[in-house]
Image (tube, coloured by chain):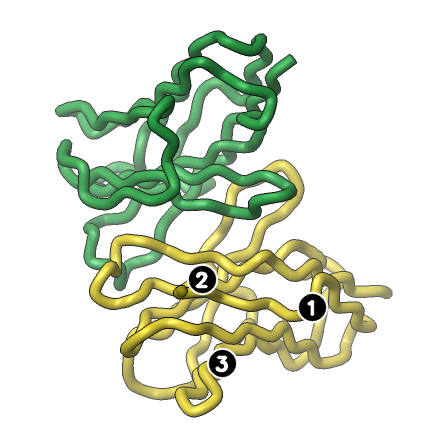
Amino acid sequence: DSGVTQTPKHLITATGQRVTLRCSPRSGDLSVYWYQQSLDQGLQFLIQYYNGEERAKGNILERFSAQQFPDLHSELNLSSLELGDSALYFCASSVDGSGTQPQHFGDGTRLSIL
Amino acid sequence: AQSVAQPEDQVNVAEGNPLTVKCTYSVSGNPYLFWYVQYPNRGLQFLLKYITGDNLVKGSYGFEAEFNKSQTSFHLKKPSALVSDSALYFCAVSPLPDTDKLIFGTGTRLQVFP
């Protein structure tokens, strides 16, 4: 058990809809990362937050947004969903944002767009 | 562009034999290097990292990896494979100065046969 909790585990919705994915980091970790894993794109870094502030941005679409709350949990919001957004979305956390410490991954949220 | 290459989609090895999973990278400077493992329907688990120092790093479950700066490689090794090692293995690079981001390879599926 990595200590990172993601909810829900599965999400099925339709095109055009909006969903929110939630992540609780490991106790004591200040940094949260979001990734998208799909068969065609592999594992792609989306965005990172550190202690409530956005730290780094990767290949995140404008339809996607995220935030980290004062209790350090994070949410990833996906809107105007398209079929191509179907993927496994992972949250990871690390104790700091230095890059020297490993990231600990949750088990992911599987998003299916019908 | 910065990238990580895992040239083998799949590696097959008999139980008890040594295994190697290859990784090469193309980033500027001296990056931080990581190996992660993913079991079915689970998130990635950290195996080991290279930050600086000894080129041979030891990690979890008997795995080790050798950093070779001249060949820009970071191959994962284990002296004696177990059937339970069968999983998907990812090499990742944290490039300086953007150490907050992890660039992942496409993954290598390791199949260990009894």
Around disc 2, counting alpha carbons within 10 Å, would you say few (fewer than 14), some (14 to 19), or many (20 or more)? many
User: Who is closer to the viewer here, A44 or A62?
Assistant: A62
Q: Secondary structure at mark 2?
A: strand
What is the chain letter for disc 1?
B
Q: Relative to A28, does residue B61 appear above or below in the rendering? A: below
Query: In the rendering, what colour is chain B?
Result: yellow
First of labels 2, 1 by sequence position: 1
Task: Kindly check if marks 1 and 3 are in contact, taking CB atoms under 8 A apart as contact.
Answer: no
How much space separates mark 2 and mark 3, taking CA atoms?
11 Å
Residue A40 position within the rendered picture, expressed as x and y whole percent measured from the top left: 63, 43
Residue B31 position within the rendered picture, expressed as x and y whole percent measured from the top left: 32, 72
**Image quarter for residue B62?**
bottom right
User: Who is closer to the viewer here, A4 or A82?
Assistant: A82
Query: In the rendering, what colour is chain A?
Result: green
**Image quarter for residue B107?**
bottom right
Residue at horizontal 21%, vertical 65%? B97
Badge 3 is on which residue? Answer: B73
Identify the mark at residue B92; answer none if there is no mark. Answer: 2
User: Who is closer to the viewer here, A103 or A45?
Assistant: A45
Can residue A31 be seen here? The reply is yes
* Amino acid at dot 3: Ser
Badge 1 is on which residue? Answer: B8
How much space separates mark 1 and mark 3, taking CA atoms?
14 Å
Residue A83 position within the rendered picture, expressed as x and y whole percent measured from the top left: 60, 21
Left or right of A96? Residue A23 is right
Q: Quadrant of the N terminus of chain B?
A: bottom left
